[in-house]
Image (cartoon, rainbow, N blue to C red):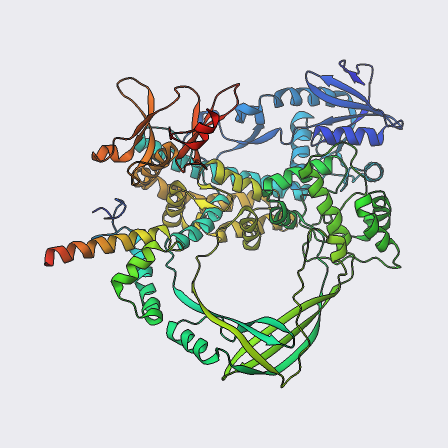
Amino acid sequence: MIDKSVPKQLESYTLIITEKPDAAARIACALDVDGKPRKIIDKGVPFYAARRSGDILVVPSLGHLYTVGGEKKDRGIYPVFEYTWIPLYEAERKAKNTRAWIATISRLAKKADVFIDACDFDIEGSIVGYNILRFACDGKQDSAKRMKYSTLTKSDIERAYVETLPTLDFSLIEAGLARHEVDWLYGVNLSRALTNAAKKVSGSHATISAGRVQGPTLSFISRREKNIQSFVPTPYWTIKTVVRLGNSDVEVDFERKKIDVEEEAEAVVKSCKGKNGIIEKSESARLERLPPPPFDLTSLQTEAYKLFGYTPIQTSMIAQRLYLDALISYPRTSSQKLPPAIGYRAILKQLLKSSEHRECAADLLGRKRLKPREGRGEDPAHPAIYPSGNLPERKHSSAERNIWNLVVRRFMASFGDPAEARSLKATIEVQGYRFHASGMETIDEGWMRCYRPFIHLVPKLLPAMKEGEEAKVRRISMEDRFTRPPPRYNPSTILKKMQNEGIGTKATRAGILQTLYDRKFIREKNIEVTELGLEVSDLLVTDCPTIASPELTRTLEERMTMIQQGKAAREEVVEEAIEILKPITEKLKDKEQAIGNQLSQALAKARLEDQIVGNCPTCKTGRLLIIRSKKTGKRFLGCTEYFEGKCKTSFPLPQQGLIRPSGTCRDCGWPKIRILMKGKRPWNLCFNPQCPSKKRLN
Amino acid sequence: MKCKICDKESADEELCRIHLKTYAKVFQGYEVWKKGLRISWEDYLRRIRVNSLTGKWAKEVAEYLISKEEKENVEKS
């Protein structure tokens, strides 16, 4: 029921603050005696009135309502080392709506006599709640209680309400505040240094951002890009051999995976062709493959990318929605452990109701003892990601279903038996050369039964073999090969790299990667670094190597962990960070002109790249560029070779809407563009007047 | 001085930092090709220029070296 009036009659009540509106609705439903709290909307801000032993108001936040900011007069200048916490709407134009939320929470706080922070139990959630209590609730942070839960199920919420922690987790909050303050100081100073330098030279504004975690991340990706771009493949040869073993033809591997000299490879082929060999050695072994540990956020993101192609940020958002629907536990965890307190059997019993998971759940429930295989990852606040046992109530998207299914299956698989396989290896000697045959067959699928369809092993069978038996070479040939460049990072592998290097947190890594995309430093799923990205990375490596190296950020992370453990003070850590930052900003200021030159050239190139639609189909050497005529002001497509007097190819362009390159035409291979107009469906245009697709339309 | 390949500021008389480093890699690569295929320097450059696995900068360096040698040959003759 929606009520637009604020309950004025309430004189005292408990005010519960949640991080998001969905969580407020769930908590209010779980705590209300009838499960039907009253929904009230105050100037667009929803909150809930529930009755239990007394009156409870549950009011949500919209994530962070406060942020770190500088003085207004300092905007655009650097270095800046003075900061304060300000309402988000003062810092970000897009956050205007948060003003109403702060006003509503402030008003509700006036008559409340008990305050409970029920935001997510992690660093970010703790800061959201702490800032609301100290700023919007007039300094109630010291008297407020804390609810701690890992799922939004009724039972978990009721337990968390009855067993509220007497105070907020101040050490966690201090660590979080330090992280925000240090990140703001680094982000604002470095970004302003680069942006101002570029603006000074080019005269036009383009935000060029850099930061404590962004710097080393861009540096890793750039290093890989350079290795790829300067890669020189070298030749090698492999030997492809098929021998007759028993009644089957089996492909075997030559003793050397790579042969560096062509003549040597030729000699092997010549000497073994059509010859008989002897099985020198044959051995079989039983192998065990242990079940995988349950997911932490990073391993879920990695697996979801591998299986479905979802980017880390997509997976994180989907998992958050599933958490708010009370289908899975809190996803922003680095734990790979499942404590018995979560109630393994109760969850599995509920999963019996899901037809696709019934078989595995029943199998596990039939066991006397349930013990999951756990990973090394730990998190003091939350266990690994696990299904709550609830089944989806609303219709979920396929992506949501995929992630839920993945979490459920991984949870069940972690309780499974090790998978068992038999491996068979044989060594065959032919003319003094050795070849190896190997096979593998699954004896017991174990945990893999629960993790299907996400794992699938193709058996490679070998016939029975005895040492001393003959094996005839049926076919042998050499293959020309080349070494390959290192693979590009993708969103999943770069997250792993960041985690291994100890930079960023589980909650921030995906967002940082997104910023690199937004700033056009990187592009594509298989990450390519743009000219601008390479330039910024080179600048950081040359002029502020501390920012580009993971050392600094790793040290700061360690110091922040120390704050959390009560071994260091926030002020001390922030001061240390400022001391490191000061000489860097001074150096950047000194070299402003040179940096500006470098950046503005890269920016100009990046802008030009944006205007290039594809290769010129006429001269084949030039590129088609969107140009605006100085005479008429109209835009058209022209070949870059026109300026050299070599090609006069040009095409008219639609004069309205945004134009984006859209690859090459499948029918004729000419470049295509996509036109985006407000209120209209985007359409693609191929420039070839003779394109077969146009003939089909006619 | 500008890089003869990309017009950026050069690190030596001819090439910028990136292309100079890549040149060193191209040079090192020849040793492996020579051992494996008994191939001439010119042939090597032509083959890496068209190899799809060769990086963009390495192709640019190969292209530059080929045209430089062609020019020198014309001048000699």
Compared with A267, A389 (above or below) is above
Q: State the count of labels.
A: 0
State which quarter of the image contains the N terminus of chain A: top right
Residue B59 appears left or right of A288: left
Q: Residue furthest bottom?
A: A468
- Residue A600 location, x and y as percent? 33, 36
Q: Give the quarter of the image for residue A583.
A: top left
Compared with A387, A271 (above or below) is below
Q: Quick check: can you spot residue A310? A: yes
Residue A346 appears left or right of A410: right
Q: Quick check: can you spot residue A126? A: no
Please name the residue shown 43% across and 32% down the image: A692
- Residue A438 location, x and y as percent? 62, 72
**Is residue A157 or residue A278 the one in the foreground?**
A278
Q: Give the quarter of the image for residue A131.
A: top right
- Residue A674 location, x and y as percent? 45, 29
**Is residue A5 or residue A465 the one in the foreground?**
A465
Residue A294 appears left or right of A209: right
Compared with A438, A330 (above or below) is above
Compared with A469, A269 (above or below) is above
**Is residue A190 or residue A1 the one in the foreground?**
A1
- Residue A171 location, x and y as percent? 66, 44
